[in-house]
Amino acid sequence: MRSSTIRRGAATLAAAALVVTSLPAAQADPVEPVKPPRLSAAAISSALARDVTTPGTAWQTEPNGTVLVSYDSTVTGDKLAELTAKTRRLGDGVVLEKLPGKLQKYVTGGEGTYGGEYKCSVGFNVYRKGRYSFLTAGHCGNIASTWYADPEHQVKIGTRQHSSYPGNDYALINYPVGIKKPGGSVYLYNGKSQDITRATTPAFGTYVYRAGVTSGLHSGRVRGLNATVNYGDGRITGLIRTSVCAEPGDSGGPLFSGRSAYGLTSGGTGDCKTPGGVTYFQPVTEALAAYGVVVY
């Protein structure tokens, strides 16, 4: 009995050994792929400035550090595929957004002509060394050297001193010599004016107003700072993005809140017939510094 028990025990041990040795070797924990570090917003913006020139595109840095890249209804097919490929290479720090309608400058021709064959809007009245002038959009200033208060070009209101577009979007129009001091800095297109005492840059989310000869007075919020826009005839940088609507003819009109001047209407998408829209503004502080003038 003892010898058979020993043999059975030995066989059991052998079988156990076989089971143990047949188990798979212990496996290491799976190695997660190492993600490359997210590019900074500055690096992404620099790459976009270098590689993206497609008309109808824009970008800005969001408060969370991502870069929002926008494209309008004209960016389709191969253009959209190219834009998508370029932004994908920049990693997850980029967010793509489709804009409603087409990005355009808000100047118009035809029914209302103030300079050449086009109409724009007066931005802010400014002053320097006894001379009164007003600011408007640079793409308006490029159009004509003489500006009138009426479509028939009967009442001259100013002569272009300088305009800057593209790159920037501001112009300085001098009122005639000897003109008495013009009214408040912002005309509200309702028979009233708003005095402006300072110029500054709004914060993200600031509630703002915009006035223009075509659509009048409208309001919204700041939705981006230091934005870049490709209209198609040049790139504009350092713009303010808002949710305020605008329409052709509103170019150059003021962006403001209370007594604070913020910007000059540049362009965007949409109109004021339906809610929403995206509009970009040239910061007024840059124009003031360039011309050495002050709002009053």
Image (tube, rainbow, N blue to C red):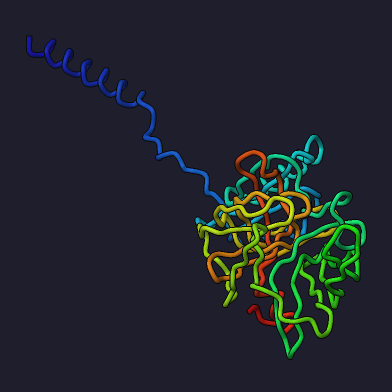
Image position, residue 282 (x, y; %):
70, 65
Residue depicted at x 67% and y 58%: 189
Residue most extreme to the left: 1
Name the residue nearer the viewer: 215 or 289.
215
In the shown orientation, is residue 6 left or right of residue 113? left
- Tell me, yes or no, if residue 234 can be seen here: yes
Name the residue nearer the viewer: 177 or 137.
177
Image position, residue 240 (x, y; %):
63, 61
Residue depicted at x 76% and y 43%: 102
Image position, residue 86 (x, y; %):
72, 48
* Labels in figure, total: 0
Name the residue nearer the viewer: 35 or 259.
259
Image position, residue 26 (x, y; %):
37, 35
Q: Quadrant of residue 264?
A: bottom right
The quarter of the rendered structure image containing the N terminus is: top left
Residue most extreme to the bottom: 129
Name the residue nearer the viewer: 281 or 30.
281
- Tell me, yes or no, if residue 38 can be seen here: no
The quarter of the rendered structure image containing the C terminus is: bottom right
Q: Quadrant of residue 236?
A: bottom right
Note whether 201 is above or below 270 in the view shown. below
Residue depicted at x 71% and y 67%: 123
